[in-house]
Image (cartoon, rainbow, N blue to C red):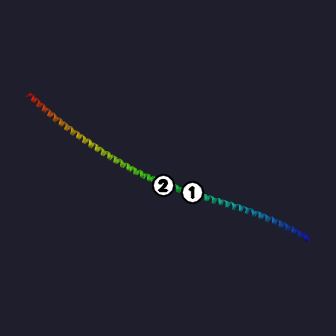
Amino acid sequence: EYNSQNETKVTELTQDKTKAEATLVKSRNETEAPKAEIVTLVKAREEAEAEKAKVEATLVKSREEAEAEKAKVEATLVKTRGEVEAQQTELASLAKAREEAEAEKANADAALMKTREAKEAKAEAKLKKTQEESDAAKAKVEATLGKAREEVQAKKAE
């Protein structure tokens, strides 16, 4: 009976041990599942952080390229403005020179016109004087001729 009791106790203890081991395995499995899930989550987080770093690096590079392009465009714009201002200054200078040339031409035309009018007036006066002298000489010749005729007739009459 003592052995029977011991065997019963051993059997009970064995069953308890088996139950405890099963519980331990179950607990381990339950603990391992969250650990595996945590490892998966950590790995996913690391991948996300790596992707974030990659995106941020791309963004920084894009920003730097955009800034460089902006600086290039601004430099071109400044250069173009300078060229436009230089051309405007040159155009203003040319316009002023043209106005001055047109004024000089107008003055020269006016002076030429005055000179022409003066020469024409002088030529007309000279022509008039010559005409008057010619008329006077003609009248003198006619008077002398008339007088000579009278003398000739007077001599004929004698």
In the rendered image, residue 105, in percent from the top left (x then y), is placed at: 34, 46
Q: Amino acid at mark 2?
A: Lys
- Give the image location of residue 120, x and y in percent: 26, 41
- The amino acid type, in three-letter code, at marker 1 is Glu
Residue at x 79%, y 64% (from the top left corner): 25
The residue sitting at 52% across, 56% down in the picture is 72
Residue under numbered circle 1? 65
User: In terms of depth relative to the viewer, which is nearer, 55 or 41?
Assistant: 55
Residue identified by numbered label 2: 79
| CA distance separating discs 2 and 1 | 21 Å
For label 2, the SS is helix
Position of the N terminus, as image quadrant, is bottom right
**Whole-percent x and y of residue 12?**
86, 67
Q: Residues within 10 Å of mark 2 (few under 14, many from 20)?
A: few
Q: Is residue 153 above or below residue 111?
A: above
Q: Residues within 10 Å of mark 1 (few under 14, many from 20)?
A: few
- Between marks 2 and 1 in the image, the one whose residue lies nearer the viewer: 2
Quarter assignment of residue 51: bottom right
Residue sitting at the far left: 158
Q: Nearer the viewer, residue 119 or 74?
A: 119
> Residue 42 placed where, x, y %?
69, 62
Quarter holding residue 157: top left
Residue at 46 percent across and 53 percent down: it is 83
Q: Is residue 135 left or right of residue 72?
A: left
Point 21% across, 39% down: residue: 130
